[in-house]
């Protein structure tokens, strides 16, 4: 177990170093940092002085180490577009994105799992067929169109829900939350449905196919032979075993949700990290792009790590395999 | 030629095509979409880029069947008096072009990488697959966005507008080559040890020739199916990037750009400027996906 964690951690560190290298290259090779910081009338001597003071005269690896050191402390420099420290910008925007992503994930799980179980148990009912066809269309619909159609129906035609922004937020220390006001909650509804819909269809299809697989196995037949109730067989025995792959996919999709939030945030003008990033791309704001890249990389690595550990905890077979293979 | 056609029409694939009405509908829809795009200069009722024919008085005309609509503009007009139907036809040209080119580029690069990785093996294989692993752990859209952002920083804004289509094709291809590389690598590992490859090696053919002349034709099947399924995804990625404002510029709009433009008028009640390009996009992609799904099943002998 311990060796397993160590190996995973090493892999994560390696990925982060690669991401860091890309971010560093963005900084140094794409935009000339000296030209960005100095006024246009600066002399050659000014440039040289700036170059030395920024440490740009040092060899590549020394610069990279300095960059990593700064990045670990959260220092990514100043946004070219907004003229404020990138770390402050990201910290301000983080709560909005995380709240949106969490709500979307909860919606996807809360509806996706029961719908998956239902379509697996009642395979031939009309509701199941309808849900499956609808999910196929859901996969073909681009996220931004779902958002636009939801806005058109609920904000423009019916006028019941807000279509942009977070509504009123409450500040809890550094964290500004929209969970505590009705306006904030109302503003959350459409974006989180938009973001969660694709994951919902994914989870539904996954649970369904896993459930169908498990229902064919011998231990389910045995459970039925023992005369257990349907409920106990379906939920106590079958569902439990379908959840192992579901955890993996949901975990990995959580990262995807945070990344896809870029699109949802643009449609709904949601003031999160994704909107910040897309504006950075439009204005070629390299420091913000590099910092976002590192942050997303970190989130992905951490999620992967947690999923691996959870997998290990949930599935006893995995532990047994590894133990018998010499405790890798 | 006639013989080949007859064999095709008598074959299993055409038989399974004839028997599924949904697939026929999807095929017809795809064909119509492609024809409408390719023949846009001939069949479109207006030329949305010909400034002489535009009339600002026609701006915001609703679809012709609703109140205030004009018979000349079937799906209404946008803010500059451009016919929405014609704009959609011209826009789907850009969408299809970017989608097809991106898939082709990703296919060529991915297949080459997969062949190298599977046939040469060793350190090269490890390197390519590690890169693929790292890339696969990030969503394609993020990678495409990043490449687009870097291109913008390198060539500047004006330069980017001119190169936008190429940058998009490259960004989408770079974000999706991994799937092809992995598929090809897997089949190459199997093919590499078969007798015909050993025979080719024994008679002294060059490794590159073995890879491309002998192994490649035997690993292309699944990759081509994957490519047909990916055309829809590539078109959606293009539309998403254009919608986010980092794709093709408004002077040369794709479906995504049209949706983005129309999105600004959603609240003033001009819904048709957004809804029709969006619906066209969804129908086109859905038809292509259905066709790709069917092709995958029809070509898979295990499912028969």
Image (cartoon, coloured by chain):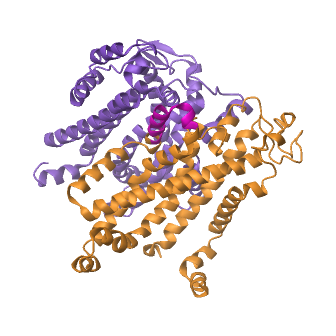
Q: Which chain is orange?
A: B
Residue B87 spot, x, y in % from top left: 73, 46
Residue A170 visible in this rendered orientation of the protein: yes
Residue at the image position 40 percent from the left and 38 percent from the top: A255
Of residues A170 and A222, the one drawn nearer to the viewer in this rendering: A170
Furthest toward the front, the residue is: A44
Of residues A80 and A181, the one drawn nearer to the viewer in this rendering: A80
**Looking at the image, residue B264 lies above or below residue A74:** below
Residue at the image position 53 percent from the left and 30 percent from the top: A282
Q: Colour of chain A?
A: purple
Furthest toward the left, the residue is: A326
Does the segment drawn in magenta span residue B63? no
Residue B263 shown left or right of residue A10 in the figure: right
Residue at the image position 28 percent from the left and 20 percent from the top: A73
Number of marks drawn: 0
Residue at the image position 42 percent from the left and 20 percent from the top: A36
Residue A158 visible in this rendered orientation of the protein: no
Please provide the residue range marked out in magenta.
B144-161
């Amino acid at each position: 177990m311990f060796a397993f964690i160590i190996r995973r951690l090493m892999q994560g560190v390696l990925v982060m170093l690669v991401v860091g290298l890309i971010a560093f290259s963005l900084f140094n090779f794409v935009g000339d940092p000296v030209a960005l910081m100095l006024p246009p009338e600066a002399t050659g001597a000014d440039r040289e002085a700036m170059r030395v003071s920024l440490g740009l005269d040092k060899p590549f690896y020394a610069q990279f180490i300095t960059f990593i050191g700064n990045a670990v402390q959260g220092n990514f420099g100043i946004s070219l577009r907004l003229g404020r420290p990138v770390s402050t910008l990201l910290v301000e925007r983080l709560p909005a994105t995380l709240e949106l992503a969490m709500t979307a994930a909860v919606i996807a799980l809360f509806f996706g799992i029961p719908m998956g179980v239902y379509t697996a148990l009642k395979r031939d009912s009309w509701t199941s067929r309808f849900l499956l066809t609808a999910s196929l269309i859901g996969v073909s619909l681009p996220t931004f169109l779902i958002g636009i159609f939801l806005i058109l129906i609920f904000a423009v035609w019916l006028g019941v829900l807000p279509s942009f922004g977070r509504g009123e937020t409450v500040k809890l220390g550094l964290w500004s939350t929209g969970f505590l006001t009705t306006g904030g909650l109302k503003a959350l509804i459409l974006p989180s449905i938009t973001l969660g819909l694709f994951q919902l269809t994914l989870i539904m299809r996954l649970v369904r196919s896993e459930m169908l697989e498990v229902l064919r196995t011998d231990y389910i037949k045995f459970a039925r032979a023992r005369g257990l109730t349907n409920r106990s067989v379906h939920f106590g025995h079958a569902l439990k075993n379908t959840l192992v792959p579901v955890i993996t996919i949901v975990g990995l999709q959580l990262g995807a949700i945070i990344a896809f939030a870029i699109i949802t945030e643009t449609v709904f003008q949601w003031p999160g990290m994704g909107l910040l990033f897309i504006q950075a791309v439009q204005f070629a704001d390299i420091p913000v792009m590099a910092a976002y890249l590192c942050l997303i990389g970190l989130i992905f690595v951490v999620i992967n790590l947690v999923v691996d550990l959870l997998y290990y905890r949930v599935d006893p077979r995995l532990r047994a395999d590894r133990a018998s293979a010499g405790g890798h | 030629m006639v013989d080949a056609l007859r064999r095709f029409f008598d074959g299993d694939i055409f038989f399974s095509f004839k028997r599924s009405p949904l697939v026929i509908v999807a095929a017809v829809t795809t064909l119509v979409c492609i024809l409408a795009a390719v023949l846009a200069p001939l069949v479109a009722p207006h030329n949305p880029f010909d400034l002489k024919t535009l009339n600002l008085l026609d701006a915001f005309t609703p679809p012709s069947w609703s109140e205030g609509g004009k018979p000349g503009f079937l799906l209404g007009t946008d803010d500059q008096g451009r016919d929405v139907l014609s704009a959609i036809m011209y826009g789907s040209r850009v969408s299809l072009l970017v989608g097809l080119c991106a898939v082709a580029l990703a296919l060529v690069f991915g297949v080459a990488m997969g062949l190298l990785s599977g046939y040469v093996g060793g350190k090269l294989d490890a390197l390519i697959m590690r890169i693929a692993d790292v890339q696969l752990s990030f969503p394609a859209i993020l990678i495409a966005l990043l490449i687009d952002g870097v291109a913008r920083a390198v060539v500047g804004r004006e330069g980017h507008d001119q190169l936008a289509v190429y940058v998009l094709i490259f960004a989408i291809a770079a974000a999706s080559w991994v799937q092809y590389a992995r598929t090809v690598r897997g089949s190459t590992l199997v093919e590499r040890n078969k007798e015909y490859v050993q025979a080719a090696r024994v008679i002294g053919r060059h490794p590159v020739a073995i890879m491309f002349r002998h192994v490649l034709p035997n690993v292309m099947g699944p990759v081509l199916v994957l490519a047909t399924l990916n055309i829809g995804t590539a078109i959606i990625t293009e539309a998403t990037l254009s919608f986010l404002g980092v794709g093709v510029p408004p002077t040369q709009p794709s479906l995504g750009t049209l949706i983005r433009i129309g999105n600004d008028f959603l609240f003033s009640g001009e819904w048709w400027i957004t809804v029709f390009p969006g619906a066209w996009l969804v129908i086109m992609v859905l038809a292509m996906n259905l066709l790709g799904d069917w092709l995958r099943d029809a070509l898979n002998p295990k499912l028969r």
